[in-house]
Structures are given as structure tokens and as C-alpha cells.
């Protein structure tokens, strides 16, 4: 059957063919009800001829449709039009793994990343009692957001009932067999079938694991694990032979990957990995520990050839310098020189090295690995092999710091202090840290950290226990202690003490604290963090990285500062320099951008820049007045105050002057007032209202011991929305302005919810939730809440309504400004369709949830704080940075 364009199957209009296989033909189609693009698979007639088969198929399809996982293609619908049975699935753009493998094997990093994603998807399905049974490259789609598994469980759903088969009953078909589940044969595709499937036995999760092992092998080598000139010889190979080791074809692959694959494809299912979760954990371990060098296992001649190729690359010359540095320092007779190179972010991501989401660079003590934020997660890069992998188990992590032995990392995520081994998938939560400002891990296995933006330092054993105060903030001088750094003795900690009202005042400086509580003294003036390395304190002076000779035994500066590098980025939002140094002379730093921050600009719906407003600045939270003539922003340097732009003239006026770290200013419906939150002390947050022209008295609307951040003001003027809680676990609350003491929760859960936005008629509220493990946009009724509708499908942030309420805009996780056509006129909310408008690089300020754009009254243009090159910071790596200083 071949369907022509325009053919209707129920509400689905066929647009064009996508492909065909043994399980049917696939078409691109339009869902005329929801105005979205879908994929329609038309089933072969022989698979739906029997009423019993149809009933079984529909029952199985209903079960499969309940699977919700980012790496499983969603099954939307099943239907019948005349004699035609069809499936309706998520439409995916990309290429199949089969097409990709036709070009050759995958790089190791992709093999491991895709392997983890497939294993996670299998684990999700297996836990719901669903087995794929036909896992093969043609059923894996590679998309921008990772892999997607197709046809999940449908091999069983489409098959007629049958009895157990014996090997002698299997047909032998010479040549290339079609991927067809024939009546009277076994289910699946021969080259990926487990021995028990070939014997006609019932398949279970371990059957999928065998096929997954074959898939991994092919991804790593570009060759099939088992092959034969006929089905009979292929079956014999699967039942009796073992494929050559992966390292035979890819000598630089980790031996641990060989072990994972071999355990997947063991003949006896009892000897295989018993769950996909086990395989996922092993692959994560391989990914994070892939630094091991396999060259020693090669024959001498091949090893010399590999070494010669590797050492001719400029990158490995740099790495050789890194490895030789420690020995050469001891010898001293060899003159060392600094060696420079650059580090790039993982493919498809940009570094996230500033603000609250990701945090600064963190070199391991031995200088071999670099931890950093990019693409909304933490990553590890081996400076020996160049391999970059996500830090599994550190989702939403920020401000990473290393253990002294370099085997573990500390970080902050979801309002908690956590630690994990760098080569292990699990993380241990130590204690609360609502809005942390750094940590450090001492040689005595004590961690010192700043749990909040306005707190002293605390200490806690790395093995767990109760956290205890180490320093106390003197409000007469400072409002914060942050960015602790252990000295080599493991007893003394350096930290920055500063004041939010005047971060660059003479009172700001570097202090030392002793774990026994006997010493707490000022060492030097500074408005940013310091690190100790190679006998020096590293600190920023404007954008120059300076090395100050320092004696850690006497805690004294012992000479004149020396400039190490220029144009180093300083994150004024958190008062931290973008640099990190190891104990053996390696240094990384983020190169500063001219005019840090973004440029307010108007863009049309095609992504064309129409005009710019004002100067380049660290402005965030742009919000348009109701008439679209003015915009409020928060300027982050030096005091995070609220400013008002007159958009037609480009003139800005400062509205607040106290330096109280204003959060997310909002306009009243008549544009006469502004509401914003501040944290004037360490004990509470305050929601304040004032006239937008700065005249008259201010009014305190609400006080909270928990962090509050306003997000919207209803068009009828009756309610304010704000998020409330810790940084990692906020809920959406509403405040009736007529009775501000009667606030009530609208969306409450154990997960993070933020960015609540009223629809123009105040009947609905859009918001962002991290319930699925990533940010997604939802809509719920107001004021009742309860029901909800998911708007984004592949992740979304920063929802904004059009003024007519018919469009809901959001930013995808791939930084595409996207619009959803919606209908909220009835009792149920409807999403009529979504489409991306254009990719946008926006300056979003200290947190990724802070808005970076607003929608004009006409719904056709957008005020965006465009980050330009600021969205792709450059990172420099220097080996032997201190060589000249040591001489």
C-alpha cells in the first residue's frame, strides 16, 4: 500500500512518505485537530487480518502509549480507516542509527552517550513490563536532543499468537532478510536476536539486553557483532561464536567497554546483565572513567604507530607538557615554559560558567580533568584524551569542587550540598544549601561551604553528619561570606567577605578561618575570590589575573604581585573570577568579553534584529509596560538595582538606589506601579511596591522567611504570582492584593516550579516544572489549580502569553523561541500546535529561570537582551603557568 499526499486517515492528513519496512509504511502527516506534525505508520494487511490480532494489538498499544521517556518515541493514537490499521507517533527529525552507521563507527563519546540514553529508555519500559523485542539500528533515531527508540513493544503487539518453535522449524532465507515478523516465525531481526529468541522461548528484559549489546558493538566498531551468508549461518554464529573484541578495530577504546558488551551478549541470559539499569550504570562508569590508556595492550609495532599519530597533534603536545610538569619541577634543571591552548564546549552546548546555573571552572588537583557547566548540566573533560562526558548523577548541579585526591566532586543541586565519585553514577546528599556560594574539600575530609547568599561559612564531614557554623557574618561590616578555599594544611580556609550594598567597598576582603576556631583574620582587600596554588594566591584585579606570593604557614603575603593573564572574566553577579588552578601548574580561565552582558534589542518573529536599546550591560529580567512604551530591567553591576528604559528614546532612569539585590520587577496593569522583591537582611525576603516614576512612599506587600521571586501581575490587578521556597524546590504561590495576608499555593510538589504567568483573562497560569527531570512548560487553571496541560514536548522555559491569549511563547532547551497556538476559551485547555520561531542567544542573568525576553503588545515582536558572543565564552588552558615566576 502506498498512500498519496492528501489521503485522510481519520483526522490525519498524509503529507509525504518517510520510509517502509517489514512492519509497515511510515508517512509524515498533519493532525488536523491539534495542528501538529505527526508520523503515521500504516500496518501490513497480514498483521491486522485477524480480529484476535487486532484486539491484541490495540491492547498492547494502549500499554505502550503510557510510556513517557525523553528517549522513547511517543505513541499518540491507534486507528482504523476502512481496512487500514494505523499508528500515530511523535514526528522526529534526524537520521536513524542505521543510516549513521552506514558512514562508519561512532566516536567513543557518542557511543557511550547514546548507549546510556538507550539503556535508560529500556529500563523505563522494562519496569512497566514492556519488552522491545526488535531493538536494532533502524529502530533508533538520532535527533538533536539525543536518541529516540522507535516501535517499542510493537513486535509483540503486531504478532499473531503462536506456539514455541524449534530450531528445525525456522525458515532459511538466503541473502538479506527483510525485517519482517512472518506468521509462523520468531519475532525480531535475526542479527540482533538472543539465543533464547532463536529457540522460540519467551522474551524478557534480558533479551533486549542481548540486542543492546549487539547495538553497542556496532556503534563502537561499525561492524555487526554476528554475521552470516544466510539465516542458518547467522543463527549458528549467534548460538556458538563470540565477536572479536572492540579493541581489535578501535585500539583506543576503553577495555571496560569490551567487558560491558561481552556481558550483554553472553549466551545464557542468567549470565548477562540482569537489568538495563545495571548496563546504564556501567556505561556511565566507563564514560566518566574513559581516561584509561589502552595503548599498552597493543602489539609494539601498532602501539608505536598509534603513539606517533597521537603525538603529532598539537593538543597532545600540550597534554604531554601537563604530564611532564610535575617531574620536571622536581628536576629543576630543565627550563619550563608556559604552554597555551583553548578548550571548547561539548558539541551542541555552550559553556555556562557564570551565575547560578553551572558555575565556574574547576580543575582537578592533578590537572588532568576539568569540571564545568554547559547545556544545563555539569560535565567532565579529560585533559589527557580530550573526551567530554556529562557528570552522571549531578543533574542541575552547579559550583563544582574537587576532593583532595581528585576522585570525587562536591557540588550543589536542588538546594542541597552533594558529593559523588567522579566515576560513579550515584550522588550522596549531605545537607541543605538553599542558594550556595561555593565549597571546598580539605585533606582531613571536611567540607566547608557557604549555604546561602547571606550567610557565614559552615563545615560538615564529607562522610555525612550535621553541618556546623564555621564563621559568622558581622552585619556592621559584611552581609556574606563565600567562595571558601582550603590551604594545603587542611586546617585553614580562605574566603571572601563582602557587603551586598557595596560589594567593592574597602571593607570587602579575603579572610582566613581556622577549623579549630582560633583564627579569623583579614589578609587583603578584594572584591572577588582567591585560590592558592604553587606558592601564590591567584586573584583578579579588574580583568587581570594576578599571582601574589603567599606563605601558607604564616598566612602572610610575601612579595609583589605579578600579572599572569589579562582579559579574565569576572562574574559580578556572584563576585567570582572565572579561573581555576591545579596543584601542578595547570591553569584554566574564561576570557572576558568586551562589554559583558547583553544588548537590549527588538527582534521580529523571523529572528531579525530590528533595533537596539541602550548600551551593552549586565541587564536581566526585561519586562514591558502594558502599553509597550517602557521596560524595566535589573542591572547587575554594581548593585542589582531596578532601572526603567524609555524605549522610544533609549533613555534609562534608576528607580532603586539601595543596592538591595532587586529581583524580577513587574508592572501593574496600568503601568503606574512596580513590584519587586529584595533581601535586605539575611533573615527574610520582602515584596515591595512603588510608583514607576519613583514618587511617593513604598509599600511592603509581603514578607517571607523563604526565598520569593515575583513572576507576574494579573491583568485585572487583583493578584500577584511568585515562586517561593529554596532555589532547588520552589512552588507557585498567589497573593491577593486586597488581602495580602491570605496568600495561597497554586502549584505545590516536591519538584521545582517557577516562572508563573497569568493568561490575559486570568483563567489560566502557565509555569515551568522540573518534575520530569528537565524544565517543561505547563498550564493549570486559576485559582483552583489541580488539572494541568503540558505545553512543551522537548523541554521549555520562560513562558510568556500574547496579549490576546491565543499564543503562548517559551524558550526550548535548544534556545529556540517557540510559540504554541492555544485555546483557553472552554473548560479544558487545548494546545492547537507548536512551532519554533528562531534561535535566540539571550543574557539571562544570574539564574537560568530568570527571564531574558518579553513579548510586545502586538505579539509579533520581542524585546530580548541579546547575549551575542556572551553565550559562547572562550576558555584558555595554560600548562606551567607559573614557570617564569618559579625561576
Image (spheres, helix red, strand yellow):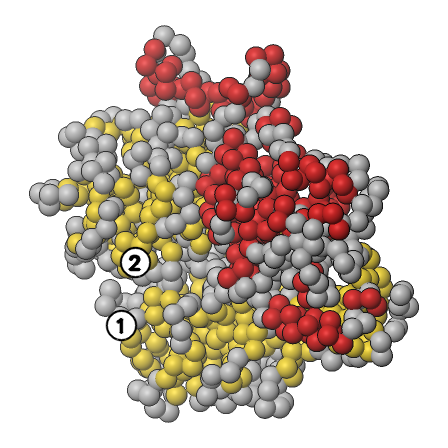
683 displayed left or right of 1:
left
What residue is drawn where x is 70% and y is 76%?
Answer: 55
Pick whichever, 171 or 878, lies toward us: 171
Q: In this view, does 783 lie above or below 218?
A: below
Residue lying farthest top? 333
Q: Name the residue under label 2.
A: 433
Specify the label residue 705 is tagged with: 1
What residue is drawn where x is 57% and y is 66%?
Answer: 68
Specify the label residue 680 is tagged with: none
Q: How far across and down, in percent of the image, does residue 628 sit?
A: 59, 76
786 displayed left or right of 602:
left
The residues bearing labels 1 and 2 have C-alpha atoms spaced at a distance of 15 Å
Q: How far across and down, in percent of the image, does residue 299 sit?
A: 58, 15
Pick whichever, 525 or 823, lies toward us: 823
Residue 238 sits in quarter: top right
Provide the secondary structure element on which disc 1 rests. loop
Of badges 1 and 2, nearer the viewer stands 2
Amino acid at each position: 500500500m502506498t498512500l498519496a499526499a492528501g489521503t485522510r486517515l481519520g483526522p490525519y492528513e498524509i503529507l509525504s512518505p518517510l520510509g517502509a519496512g517489514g512492519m509497515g509504511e511510515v508517512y509524515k502527516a498533519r493532525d488536523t485537530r491539534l495542528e501538529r506534525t505527526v508520523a503515521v505508520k500504516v500496518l501490513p494487511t497480514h498483521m491486522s487480518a485477524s480480529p484476535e490480532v487486532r484486539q491484541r494489538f490495540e491492547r498492547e498499544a494502549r500499554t505502550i502509549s503510557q510510556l513517557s521517556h525523553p528517549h522513547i518515541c511517543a505513541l499518540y493514537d491507534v486507528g482504523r480507516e476502512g481496512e487500514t490499521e494505523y499508528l500515530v507517533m511523535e514526528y522526529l527529525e534526524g537520521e536513524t542509527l542505521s543510516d549513521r552507521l552506514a558512514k562508519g563507527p561512532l566516536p567513543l563519546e557518542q557511543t557511550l552517550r547514546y548507549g546510556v540514553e538507550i539503556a535508560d529508555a529500556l529500563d523505563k519500559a522494562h519496569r512497566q513490563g514492556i519488552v522491545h523485542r526488535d531493538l536494532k539500528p533502524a529502530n533508533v533515531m538520532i535527533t538533536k536532543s539525543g536518541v529516540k527508540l522507535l516501535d517499542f513493544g510493537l513486535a509483540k503487539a503486531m504478532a499473531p499468537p503462536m506456539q514455541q518453535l524449534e530450531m528445525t522449524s525456522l525458515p532459511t532465507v538466503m541473502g538479506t532478510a527483510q525485517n519482517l515478523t512472518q506468521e509462523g516465525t520468531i519475532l525480531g531481526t535475526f542479527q540482533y536476536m538472543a539465543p533464547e529468541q532463536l529457540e522460540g522461548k519467551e522474551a524478557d528484559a534480558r533479551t533486549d539486553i542481548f540486542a543492546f549489546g549487539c547495538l553497542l558493538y556496532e556503534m563502537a566498531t561499525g561492524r555487526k557483532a554476528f554475521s552470516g551468508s544466510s539465516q542458518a549461518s547467522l543463527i549458528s554464529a549467534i548460538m556458538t561464536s563470540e565477536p572479536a573484541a572492540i579493541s581489535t578495530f578501535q585500539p583506543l577504546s576503553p577495555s571496560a567497554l569490551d567487558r560491558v558488551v561481552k556481558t550483554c551478549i553472553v549466551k545464557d541470559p542468567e549470565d548477562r546483565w540482569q537489568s538495563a539499569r545495571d548496563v546504564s550504570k556501567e556505561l556511565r562508569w566507563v564514560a566518566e572513567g574513559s581516561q584509561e590508556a589502552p595503548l599498552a595492550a597493543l602489539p609494539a609495532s601498532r602501539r608505536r604507530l598509534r603513539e606517533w599519530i597521537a603525538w603529532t597533534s598539537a593538543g597532545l603536545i600540550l597534554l604531554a607538557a601537563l604530564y611532564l610538569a610535575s617531574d620536571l619541577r622536581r628536576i629543576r634543571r630543565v627550563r619550563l615554559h608556559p604552554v597555551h591552548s583553548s578548550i571548547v564546549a561539548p558539541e551542541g552546548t555552550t559553556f555556562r560558567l557564570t551565575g547560578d546555573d553551572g558555575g565556574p571552572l574547576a580543575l582537578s588537583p592533578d590537572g588532568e580533568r576539568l569540571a564545568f557547566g554547559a547545556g544545563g548540566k555539569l560535565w567532565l573533560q579529560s585533559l589527557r584524551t580530550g573526551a567530554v562526558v556529562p557528570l552522571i548523577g549531578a543533574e542541575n548541579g552547579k559550583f563544582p569542587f574537587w576532593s583532595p585526591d581528585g576522585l570525587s566532586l562536591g557540588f550543589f543541586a536542588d538546594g542541597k550540598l552533594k558529593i559523588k565519585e567522579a566515576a560513579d553514577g550515584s550522588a550522596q546528599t549531605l545537607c541543605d544549601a538553599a542558594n550556595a556560594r561555593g565549597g571546598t574539600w580539605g585533606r582531613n575530609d571536611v567540607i566547608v561551604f557557604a549555604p546561602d547568599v547571606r550567610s557565614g561559612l559552615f563545615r560538615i564531614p564529607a562522610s555525612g553528619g550535621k553541618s556546623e557554623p564555621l564563621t559568622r557574618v558581622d552585619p556592621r561590616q559584611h552581609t556574606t561570606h563565600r567562595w571558601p578555599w582550603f590551604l594545603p594544611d587542611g586546617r585553614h580556609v580562605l574566603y571572601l567577605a563582602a557587603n551586598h550594598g557595596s560589594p567593592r567597598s574597602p571593607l570587602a576582603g579575603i579572610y582566613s578561618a581556622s577549623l579549630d576556631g582560633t583564627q579569623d583574620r583579614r589578609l587583603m582587600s578584594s572584591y572577588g575570590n582567591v585560590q592558592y596554588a604553587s606558592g601564590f594566591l591567584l586573584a583578579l584585579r579588574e580583568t587581570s589575573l594576578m599571582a601574589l606570593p603567599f606563605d601558607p604557614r604564616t598566612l602572610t603575603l610575601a612579595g609583589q604581585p605579578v600579572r599572569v593573564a589579562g582579559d579574565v572574566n569576572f562574574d559580578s553577579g556572584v563576585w567570582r573570577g572565572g579561573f581555576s588552578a591545579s596543584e601542578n601548574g595547570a591553569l584554566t580561565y574564561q576570557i572576558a568579553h568586551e562589554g559583558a552582558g547583553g544588548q537590549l534589542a527588538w527582534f521580529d518573529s523571523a529572528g531579525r534584529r530590528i533595533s537596539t536599546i541602550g548600551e551593552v550591560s549586565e541587564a536581566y529580567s526585561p519586562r514591558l509596560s502594558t502599553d509597550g512604551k517602557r521596560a524595566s530591567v535589573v542591572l547587575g553591576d554594581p548593585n542589582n538595582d531596578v532601572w526603567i528604559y524609555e524605549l522610544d528614546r533609549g533613555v534609562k532612569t534608576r528607580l532603586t538606589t539601595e543596592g538591595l539585590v532587586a529581583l524580577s520587577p513587574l508592572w501593574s496593569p496600568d503601568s503606574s506601579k512596580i513590584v519587586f522583591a529584595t533581601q535586605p537582611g539575611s533573615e527574610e525576603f520582602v515584596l515591595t511596591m512603588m510608583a514607576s516614576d519613583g514618587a511617593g512612599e513604598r509599600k511592603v506587600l509581603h514578607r517571607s522567611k523563604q526565598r520569593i521571586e515575583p513572576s507576574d501581575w494579573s491583568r485585572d490587578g487583583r493578584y500577584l504570582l511568585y515562586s517561593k521556597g529554596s532555589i532547588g524546590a520552589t512552588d507557585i504561590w498567589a497573593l491577593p492584593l486586597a488581602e495580602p495576608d491570605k496568600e495561597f499555593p497554586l502549584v505545590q510538589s516536591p519538584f521545582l516550579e517557577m516562572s508563573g504567568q497569568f493568561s490575559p483573562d486570568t483563567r489560566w497560569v502557565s509555569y515551568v516544572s522540573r518534575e520530569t527531570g528537565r524544565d517543561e512548560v505547563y498550564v493549570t487553571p486559576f485559582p483552583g489549580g489541580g488539572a494541568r496541560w503540558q505545553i512543551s514536548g522537548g523541554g521549555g522555559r520562560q513562558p510568556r502569553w500574547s496579549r490576546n491569549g491565543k499564543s503562548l511563547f517559551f524558550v526550548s532547551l535548544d534556545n529556540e523561541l517557540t510559540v504554541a497556538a492555544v485555546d483557553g476559551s472552554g473548560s479544558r485547555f487545548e494546545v492547537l500546535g507548536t512551532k519554533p520561531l528562531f534561535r535566540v542567544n539571550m543574557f539571562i542573568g544570574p539564574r537560568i529561570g530568570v527571564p531574558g525576553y518579553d513579548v510586545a503588545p502586538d505579539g509579533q515582536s520581542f524585546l530580548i537582551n541579546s547575549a551575542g558572543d556572551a553565550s559562547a565564552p572562550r576558555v584558555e588552558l595554560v600548562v606551567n603557568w607559573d614557570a617564569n615566576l618559579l625561576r
